[in-house]
Image (tube, rainbow, N blue to C red):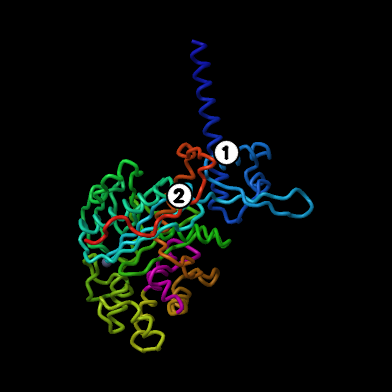
């Protein structure tokens, strides 16, 4: 009996050591890959982890061998030994992120350094779930195949779309923005022969993906934000709340439907079927209509009209800002969030929205006399949703050292991903 107990204890100790070892590896990987200090040295990492220099050096060697981080040329700092800066490895692992919108699909392949290695954009001529998802499946298969041909290990595929997902996250219950109900997402993608090499595809709310991107990019720019409400305007208005560096998506994961908050009596029917929703006053369609443009006219027309100071367009945007401010003020009164980040259409309209929004917030948020609410423009310059979906996959991967693979040293070469899609994307 004693022997059995002793051996059990040993197994536990070994498991404990492995998990502590993996925990330390993940902390260092995260500090290099998502931390706000660019190219940290071993000394800095030893300081923030509390590990001694020799343990830390051993872990760093492992991270290099697994293709997670790389060494840059050494730099002379002061009179001591030159420091060797560490950076995320390039072109070892990659993640694919997809943004599924009502009339288009955008996808990105992102590596550990946050570099976008390939992108695909497709204007869809259909709003039907089945047809759109077949196209999404083709784009994913194509990017996956091209990434594999470039010798990258694809560690995650995440598609972002607006809507309510069931508990296991692969069945879409409803998406008012897309006009879809009851869709088995994973099955509808019809991934063919690539499937056996591909990680299982996961799905994410688009606002959460956008907020992931914002969080990562702000960190990388040395302007970290850990508590903010991310708001993305477009045909729908979605929000994601980040509290203390992590998401609060609500009990079922269905929080963030800012577009369907009641703001005023109205006659326009919202995509959810109700009237009076913020979306029907401040969504893209409402702004375009109030500016005198048809729903399908290009959004560029609105920007041109604003540049020309056309009264109708200016009034439409001011009115949208007013309703948006009303909804956001309620949110801040309830949730006490210090910062609001605007993305999507609202990021493009930022210079027109900011002042009226601040005014509304200072009037209606009771605590605003003691603490000013920050309204910021999203830092992202490209499609933040596709990037954020891919980045979520990267963060999951670097958190799980058991998934890392030892790299063959001479194989750490750079093969660019081919520009040309290898599958036909037309419908
Ligand atoms: Zn609604």
Query: Is 213 located above or below residue 196 in the figure?
Result: below
In the image, is residue 323 above or below residue 84?
Answer: below
**Is residue 410 in sight in this rendering?**
yes
Find out if the beta carbon at label 2 lies less than 8 Å from the nearest ligand 1 atom.
no
Q: CA distance from mark 1 to mark 2?
A: 18 Å
Q: Quadrant of ligand 1?
A: bottom left
From which residue to which does the magenta span run?
Answer: 324-351
> Which residue in the protein does label 1 denote?
62
What residue is rendered at 46% in x and 65% in y?
Answer: 380
Label 2 CA crowd tier, 10 Å (few <14, some 14–19, many 20+): many
Residue 208 makes an appearance in the image: no
| Residue at numbered disc 2 | 394
Residue 60's spot in the image, x, y percent?
60, 41
Give the SS element for disc 1. Answer: helix
**171 inside magenta stretch:** no
Q: Residue at x 50, y 22 (%)?
A: 11
Camera-nearest residue between 322 and 145 = 145
Q: Is residue 88 above or below residue 128?
A: above
């Amino acid at each position: 009996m004693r022997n059995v107990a002793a051996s059990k204890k040993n197994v536990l100790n070994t498991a404990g050591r492995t998990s502590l070892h993996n925990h330390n590896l993940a902390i260092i990987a995260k500090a290099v890959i998502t931390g706000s200090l660019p190219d940290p040295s071993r000394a800095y990492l030893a300081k923030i982890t509390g590990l001694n220099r020799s343990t830390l050096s051993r872990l760093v060697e492992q991270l290099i061998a697994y293709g997670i981080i790389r060494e840059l040329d050494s730099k002379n700092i002061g009179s001591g030994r030159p420091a060797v800066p560490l950076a995320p490895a390039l072109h070892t692992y990659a993640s694919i992120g997809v943004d599924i919108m009502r009339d288009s699909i955008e996808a990105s392949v992102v590596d550990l350094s946050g570099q976008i290695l390939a992108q695909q954009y497709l204007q869809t001529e259909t709003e039907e779930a089945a047809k759109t998802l077949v196209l999404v499946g083709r784009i994913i298969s194509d990017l996956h195949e091209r990434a594999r041909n470039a010798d990258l290990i694809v560690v995650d595929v995440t598609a972002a779309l607006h809507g309510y997902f069931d508990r296991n996250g692969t069945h879409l219950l409803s998406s008012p923005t897309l006009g879809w109900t009851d869709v088995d997402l994973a099955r509808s993608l019809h991934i063919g022969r690539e499937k056996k090499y591909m990680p299982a595809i996961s799905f994410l709310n688009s606002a959460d993906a956008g907020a992931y991107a914002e969080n990562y990019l702000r960190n990388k720019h040395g302007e970290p934000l850990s508590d903010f409400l991310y708001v993305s305007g477009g045909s729908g208005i979605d929000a994601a709340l980040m509290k203390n560096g992590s998401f609060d998506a609500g009990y079922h994961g269905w929080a963030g439907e800012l577009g369907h908050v009641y703001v005023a009596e109205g006659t326009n029917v919202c995509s959810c079927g109700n009237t009076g929703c913020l979306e029907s006053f401040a969504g893209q369609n409402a702004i375009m209509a109030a500016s005198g443009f048809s729903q399908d006219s290009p959004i560029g027309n609105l920007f041109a009209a604003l540049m020309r100071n056309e009264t109708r367009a200016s009034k439409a945007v001011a009115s949208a800002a007013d309703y948006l401010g009303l909804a956001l003020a309620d949110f801040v009164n309830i949730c006490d969030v210090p910062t609001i980040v605007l993305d999507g259409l609202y990021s493009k309209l930022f210079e027109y929205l900011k002042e009226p929004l601040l005014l509304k917030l200072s009037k209606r948020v009771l605590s605003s006399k003691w603490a000013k609410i920050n309204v910021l423009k999203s830092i992202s310059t490209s499609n933040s949703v596709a990037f954020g979906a891919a980045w979520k996959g990267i963060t999951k991967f670097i958190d799980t050292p058991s998934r890392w693979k030892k790299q063959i040293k001479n194989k750490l070469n750079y093969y660019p991903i081919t520009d040309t899609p290898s599958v036909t994307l037309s419908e």
